[in-house]
Image (tube, rainbow, N blue to C red):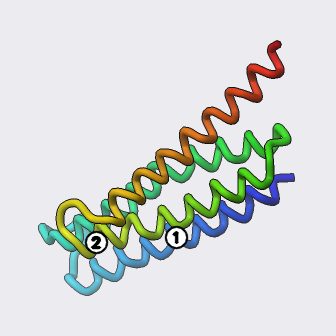
Amino acid sequence: MLITTALYASLLALIIFWLSYNVVNFRRKKQVDLGDGGHEEGIRHIRAQQNTIEYIPLILILMAVYELNNGSVLLIHIFGVALVIARIIYPLGLINKRGASFGRFYGTLVTWLVMVGFIVLNLIKVVKVMI
């Protein structure tokens, strides 16, 4: 069973839902049928949503594979909590401030570290089986 991954998949899906709601809300407010309507605010909402959608599926696959291969539940929780926080602060930094921001920088950094962490953990499992 993938109970731990299910927890983080659900929390991250809530974040995607929140970001999707922001895009729909922006489009209704500005009466934009498709895309951003040339509004910077729309670009920011759409990119916040899309950036999250670009990373989450791959990381969840890596997390699930690690859990299926009897990975450390503690490490999954550490990485999972870090990822949820990163995926909350990233869009807040992107939407609320032009240019570099705390949220954008650390949200991206932590997301990348979690992804690389799961890559390394999975590769270690593979090497142990091969030896």
* Position of residue 96 in the picture relative to residue 18 (left or right): left
Residue at the image point whose x is 72% and y is 65% from the top? 7
Furthest residue to the top? 131
Circle 2 is placed at which residue position?
A: 95
Element class at badge 1: helix
* Position of residue 116 in the picture relative to residue 70 (left or right): left
Q: Earlier in the sequence, mark 2 or mark 1?
A: 1
**What's the mark number on residue 15?**
1
Element class at badge 2: helix
Q: Quadrant of residue 65?
A: top right
* Position of residue 63 in the picture relative to residue 101 (left or right): right
Residue at the image point whose x is 34% and y is 82% from the top? 25
* Position of residue 93 in the picture relative to residue 84 (left or right): left
What kind of residue is marked 2?
Ile
Residue at the image point whose x is 65% and y is 44% from the top? 61
Q: x, y (%) of residue 38?
A: 12, 67
Q: x, y (%) of residue 127?
A: 75, 20
Q: x, y (%) of residue 69?
A: 82, 37
